[in-house]
Image: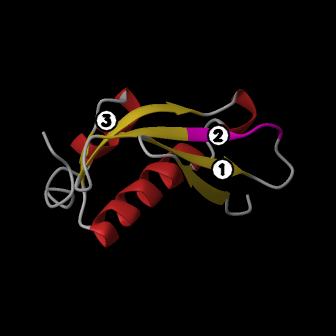
């Protein structure tokens, strides 16, 4: 599988990562809410059936984490997918996940 193309858009209070994969129908997404300049909430992740099991959800979560680290932000993992990913990697994400 080719690597997903991930884009990011934001408003004053919301953020959205979107991923597409060449040859796969649909678009995966991970949405966030901004609490402050240093705290965001991972709200929701959705991966269409055509992309399930391909690592697209993980790629979205990892992009969110990388961006938050770069900006000095912490993430509240409200979304079950991001929460599960964070729990699997709890020690290495201790600097960016707000439990």
Mark 2–mark 1 Cα distance, whole angstroms, equals: 5 Å
Q: Earlier in the sequence, mark 2 or mark 1?
A: 1
The label on residue 19 is 1
What's drawn in magenta, residue-wise? Answer: 25-29
Q: Quadrant of the C terminus?
A: top left
Secondary element at image label 3: helix
Q: Secondary structure at mark 1?
A: strand
CA gap between label 1 and label 3 equals: 20 Å
| Residue under label 2 | 28
Callout 2 crowding tier (Cα within 10 Å): few <14, some 14–19, many ≥20 = many
Residue at 25% across, 48% down: 36
- Real-space Cα distance between discs 2 and 3? 17 Å
Q: Residue shown at 24%/66% (left/top)?
A: 72
Q: Is residue 72 magenta?
A: no
Q: Which residue is pictured at 28% across the width and 37% down the height?
A: 77
> In front here: 36 or 44?
36
Front residue of this view, candidates 53 and 40: 40
Residue 6 percent across, percent down from the top left: 63, 58
Q: Nearer the viewer, residue 79 or 88?
A: 79
Residue 84's disc number: 3
Q: Residues within 10 Å of mark 3 (few under 14, many from 20)?
A: few
Disc number lying in front (1 or 3): 1
Please identify the dominant SS of the magenta region: loop
Q: Residue 67 occupies which quadrant of the picture?
A: bottom left
Q: Around disc 1, counting alpha carbons within 10 Å, would you say few (fewer than 14), some (14 to 19), or many (20 or more)?
A: many
- Between disc 1 and disc 3, whose residue precedes? 1
């Amino acid at each position: 599988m080719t690597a997903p193309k991930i884009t990011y858009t934001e408003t004053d209070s919301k953020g959205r990562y979107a991923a597409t994969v060449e040859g796969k129908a649909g678009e995966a997404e991970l949405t966030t809410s901004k609490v402050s300049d240093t705290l965001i909430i991972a709200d929701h992740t959705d991966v269409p059936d055509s992309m399930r099991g391909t690592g697209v959800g993980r790629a979205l979560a990892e992009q969110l984490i990388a961006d938050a680290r770069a900006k000095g932000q912490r993430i509240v993992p409200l979304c079950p997918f991001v929460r599960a990913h964070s729990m699997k990697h709890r020690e290495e994400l201790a600097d960016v996940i707000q439990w």
